[in-house]
Image (spheres, helix red, strand yellow):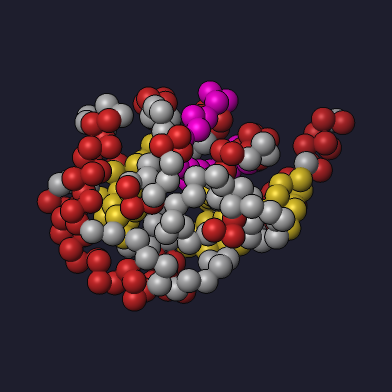
Amino acid sequence: MTEIKEKADFKISLADPLFFSLQGEGATIGRPSVFIRLMGCSVGCVWCDTKYSWSGPPVEEKTIAEILDFCEKHEGAQVVVTGGEPLESSQFPTLIEELHGAGLRVEVETAGHIPPSEDVLERVNQWNVSPKLKSAQISEEKLPKTLAWLRRAKEPYLKFVVHRAEELDEVENVLDKYSLGGFPRNRIIISPGGKTREQMEHRLFALAEASMNRGFRFTPRLHVMLWGDKRGV
């Protein structure tokens, strides 16, 4: 009983207040979702649209009990754990354990440079893994050393933020680098870069056609199209 209470009182540091919205990109685009944006990221993508999540202080701290109560109020919604880089948070394993224990469907968005533990792999329903291309201008040490763990994940997807159609050659090189040539093409998602609708719109048609021709999936960033560069959506 004491352990249950301690878990309920366990606090999670958030870069945004808990919010309910539509999943804006990837395989479950348009799905009602509760978003838990964890604090902290050392990856350092130059085009990142959540740089405020890189370092503290957090916007707020919520207990596990408060998070589960918020999720309960949005019946039928999945939960998206994002960041920042959620796997850098020491609070991440406990959060995943409790979300899974509550019977919630959980997606995790990660850059992939930190392999998850086997317990976490078992408890997450879907992985949205986004290896960074050269345009992100990150250090070599922040690139994944391996993505072999994707073969043990329940619902793995690769998502690449792309600004020019020519970068799809680089995507192919990344697949070769991590021995993912046999990874299903319908689980490889191309997402156009851009913090505003205007920045993104001019890329849509060229990237959609180029992605289709290679058998990749393509999704726009729905939240940017609907709300622009706004937090908490």
Q: Position of residue 218 (x, y in %)?
A: 26, 55
Instruction: Place residue 24 in its image quadrant.
Output: bottom left
Q: Nearer the viewer, residue 53 or 31?
A: 53
Tally of numbered discs: 0
Residue drawn at x 70%, y 50% is 13
Q: Where is residue 131 in the image (x, y as percent from the top left)?
A: 38, 42
Q: Position of residue 55 (x, y in %)?
A: 64, 52
Q: Position of residue 21 (x, y in %)?
A: 53, 64
107 within the magenta span: yes
Instruction: Place residue 73 in its image quadrant.
Output: bottom right
Q: In the image, 211: left or right of 40?
A: left
Q: In this view, does 181 lie above or below 52?
A: above
Residue drawn at x 48%, y 71% is 229
Residue at the right extreme, as displayed: 2
Q: Nearer the viewer, residue 58 or 104?
A: 58
Q: In the rendered image, is residue 73 in sight?
A: no
Q: Nearer the viewer, residue 225 or 43?
A: 43
Instruction: Place residue 6 in its image quadrant.
Output: top right
